[in-house]
Amino acid sequence: MKIVMLGAPGAGKGTQAKMIAAEYGIPHISTGDIFRANIKEGTELGVKAKAYMDQGLLVPDSLTLELIMDRFTKDDCANGYVLDGFPRTIAQAEALTASLKEQGDALDYAIDVDVPDESIVNRMSGRRACIACGGTYHIVFNPPKKEGICDLCGGELTIRKDDVPETVQKRLNVYHEQTQPLIDYYNGEGILRTVDGTQEVAEVFESIKAFLNA
Ligand code: ADP
Ligand code: AMP
């Protein structure tokens, strides 16, 4: 099964993608996580990506496409994947469609996690992320068992640099301009499914499973 998660930054794509990955035995591929891992390791890609990410801008398509196409060649993608944060532009979506088509393949679903901008700022300001394993929490809506510590790996939880309110607003603008058009794109392909992302985490997941198991 090949799934794309759509939605504004902070809508809950990563939270749901991790649950989908565990339930259906497919890898969760987050371009944001891959960029952050590169930044942490100080790679050339990381240095280039950081300049855009810190400003709330998108990393250029050329860099992002090279990275994701390489990721698709790994063995764990044999049965599909759930993509989180990719594609983010029409050019990226078209490149993905073309690359799959070359192999006689196509995406199965694009799931739009729909959350109004008003709720996003709250979610981002409370988000805490584990740098070690990518685990995501919220201080009110999805707190870790022990404050500041990742339930999954015991790593330290931090506030993402791009989750400060000024950058969040910029990321929302970028989302509306460059990424939201993908909703129409995938609707046109007939694979769009929309879930109400303002529900509780478990309820959002039930709605998604209802689509995937239909
Ligand atoms: P995205 O991957 O879309 O940027 P995340 O999955 O990281 O978003 O979620 C953003 C923040 O909102 C996190 O702190 C997460 O714990 C929290 N969150 C995710 N889903 C929900 C939900 N349904 N209700 C409330 N908070 C949520
Ligand atoms: P995310 O973790 O999905 O919120 O992504 C964090 C940041 O990484 C974004 O604000 C972008 O700067 C960058 N990024 C992640 N995925 C992409 C992508 N597909 N295209 C361009 N930039 C991306």
Image (cartoon, rainbow, N blue to C red):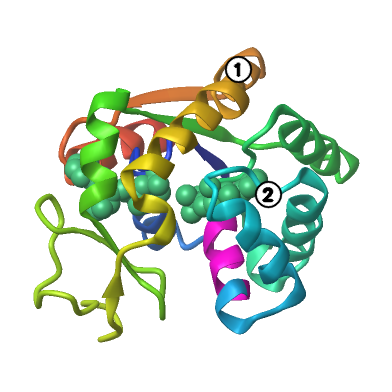
- Place residue 73 in its image quadrant: bottom right
* Residue farthest bottom in this picture: 154
Residue corresponding to mark 2: 59
Q: Is residue 147 above or below residue 102?
A: below
Q: Which mark is residue 131?
A: none
Q: Residue 140 location, x and y as percent?
A: 9, 53
In what element is the residue under mark 2? loop
Estimate how packed mark 2 is, as few (under 14), some (14 to 19) or many (20 or more) residues with alpha carbons within 10 Å.
some
Q: Is mark 1 within 8 Å of ligand 2?
A: no
- Place residue 152 in its image quadrant: bottom left
Q: Residue at x 86, y 46 (%)?
A: 103
Residue corresponding to mark 1: 190
Q: Residue at x 9, y 78 (%)?
A: 146
Residues rendered magenta in the picture: 27-38
Residue nearer the viewer, 38 or 203: 38
Is residue 163 highlighted in magenta?
no
Q: Is residue 151 visible?
A: yes
Q: Earlier in the sequence, mark 1 or mark 2?
A: 2
